[in-house]
Amino acid sequence: MISFNHVKKEYVAGGQITNVYENFNEIIEDGEFVVLTGESGSGKSTLIKMILKEVEPQSGTILVDGKDISKISTKQIPFYRRGIGVLFQDFRLIQSETVYDNLVTAILATGGSRKEAGKKIVNVLTMLGIDRLHKRYPKELSGGEQQKVCLARAIINNPRLLLVDEPTGNLDPTSSEELNRLLEVINRQGVTVVMATHDIDAAKRPGRRRINLDMKK
């Protein structure tokens, strides 16, 4: 469970203070598929970055599985993040590595071993329907295929939580629909999904709960 309690977050730029959250309270239950909507600047990406501990609130608490994440030290952050998968709009794949090697890198980065990598990679690529692409380089893939590889990378270490930030922004409608379907498959496996998007239709799909950040500050 993720609990936001009286969270305040502001940014200072050019001497101007922008309040993103003044007194934000919300609970995301284990196994939910939550969609964050709102205008640009409403705090969708900021909320995801706070869960990931990329940015910190000015005040209030964020509890993940009952633990106040403000108390996680800098050295502990990589271990905390091992239980979280992240999918961004921009693919962030290593262009000089094949699909297979991109996933090996993700496994090794979180303390896994090469010995266990092969089976894990075959399983996740097969589940996502892209096992035929394992020897390809990112530049040889379509946008939709690259995003599926990124999704494979996000879930390769069996996270309990998947954070998704505008995943369909660079995709065509067919690829967007396929990605949404795969996210639902992953959610049905017990993974909590928190997705930020401008796509209101995606927010209205069955089994999802919408949090409109224009209305909740």
Image (tube, rainbow, N blue to C red):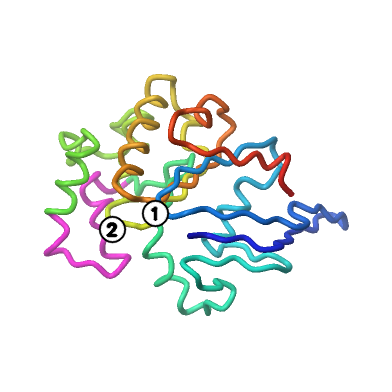
Residue located at (46% from left, 50% from top): 163
* Extreme residue toward the top, this view: 173
Residue located at (56% from left, 73% from top): 68
Q: Which residues are magenta?
A: 96-118
The disc at residue 85 is 1
Counting residues from the N terminus, which is met first, the one under dot 2 or under dot 1?
A: 1
Q: Residues within 10 Å of mark 1 (few under 14, many from 20)?
A: many
Observer-nearest residue: 131 or 190? 190
Tell me: residue 69, above or below residue 192: below
Task: List x then y, in percent, for residue 164.
Answer: 47, 45
- Residue 112 sits inside the magenta stretch: yes
The disc at residue 157 is 2
Task: Give, as a three-letter code, the residue at label 1.
Answer: Gly
- Residue 103 sits inside the magenta stretch: yes
Q: Is residue 67 left or right of residue 13?
A: left
Observer-nearest residue: 201 or 77? 201
Q: Is residue 105 left or right of residue 205?
A: left
Residue located at (35% from left, 49% from top): 94
Task: Give, as a three-letter code, the residue at label 2.
Answer: Asn
Q: Helix or strand or loop: what does disc 2 sit on?
A: loop
Residue located at (63% from left, 52% from top): 46
